Image (cartoon, rainbow, N blue to C red):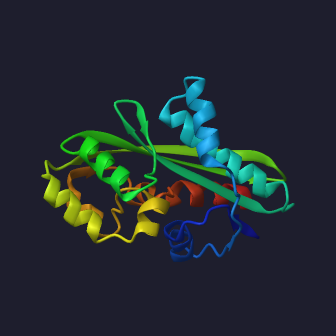
């Protein structure tokens, strides 16, 4: 069975590879900022933004690749039900970390599977994270260890790397926090294959 991952995330690809789901990567080129702005203007919650982006990525790629399972995924940060976007600069990354500092927030990860341009399955997980109370120098030291392109592509923290040290606690599925609730995907694929 052919599978496509509609994401440029190396971490998501690694999760699929580790679970023996060989897939091709086809980037959707969805303008995420434009979609987020439009949804937020209509009053959409961070959860709805995450679900819509996962579906849009999946269906867009799926429409060009018939008879293929296409996995689209998206993760967003929700702080007091406010969407926290990926930073566009190092200064913005610092401001985001200050906002999250000593606070509980949610990381919402959505995944969608489409076939022939139509969604056939979706799933959303929400994980709770509480950041430690860190001073400005500690936040800057953390940011200085991250390459700018990584920061802008993946957001202010990478829990699979040094970002884990920022947190007092993390409650949720590890793979979902990394961006792909793989157990749920595997369960769907088992049913699909029957």
Image quadrant where residue 103 sits: top left
Q: Position of residue 147 (x, y in %)?
A: 38, 71
Q: How many marks?
A: 0
Question: Could you tell me if residue 118 is visible in this image?
Answer: yes
Side of 25 relative to 100 (left or right) = right
**Residue at figure coordinates x 61%, y 47% from the top left:** 32
Reply above or below: 111 against 183.
above
Q: Residue at x 13, y 48 (%)?
A: 133
Q: Using the image, determine if residue 23 lies above or below residue 174.
A: below
Residue 194 seen in render: no
Q: Is residue 124 left or right of residue 93?
A: right
**Residue 56: x and y, percent?**
70, 46
Name the quadrant of the C terminus.
bottom right
Which residue is nearer to you in this view: 33 or 1? 33
Residue at point 40%, 30% (across, down): 81
Q: Position of residue 52 (x, y in %)?
A: 63, 40
Instruction: Check the image and name the residue furthest to the top.
Output: 43
- Nearest the eye: 150 or 111: 150
Q: Residue at x 84, y 62 (%)?
A: 65
Pick the residue in front: 156 or 161: 156
Q: Position of residue 58 (x, y in %)?
A: 70, 53
Q: Nearer the viewer, residue 26 or 99?
A: 99
Q: Quadrant of the N terminus?
A: bottom right
Q: Is residue 31 above or below residue 52?
A: below
């Amino acid at each position: 069975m052919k599978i496509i991952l509609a994401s440029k995330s190396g971490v998501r690809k690694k999760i699929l590879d580790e679970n023996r789901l060989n897939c091709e990567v086809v980037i959707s080129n969805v303008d995420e900022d434009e979609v987020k702005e439009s949804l937020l203007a209509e009053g959409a919650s961070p959860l709805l933004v995450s679900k819509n982006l996962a579906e849009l990525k999946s269906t867009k790629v799926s429409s060009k690749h018939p008879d293929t399972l296409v996995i689209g995924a998206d993760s967003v940060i929700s702080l007091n039900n406010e969407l926290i976007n990926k930073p566009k600069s190092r200064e913005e990354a610092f401001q985001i970390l200050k906002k999250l500092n000593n606070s509980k927030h949610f990381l919402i990860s959505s995944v969608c599977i489409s076939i022939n341009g139509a969604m056939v399955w979706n799933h959303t997980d929400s994980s709770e994270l509480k950041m430690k109370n860190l001073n400005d120098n500690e936040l800057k030291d953390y940011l200085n260890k991250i390459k700018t392109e990584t920061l802008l592509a993946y957001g202010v923290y990478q829990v699979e790397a040094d970002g884990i040290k920022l947190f007092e606690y993390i409650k949720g599925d590890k793979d979902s926090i990394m961006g792909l609730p793989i157990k749920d995907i595997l369960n769907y694929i088992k049913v699909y294959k029957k």
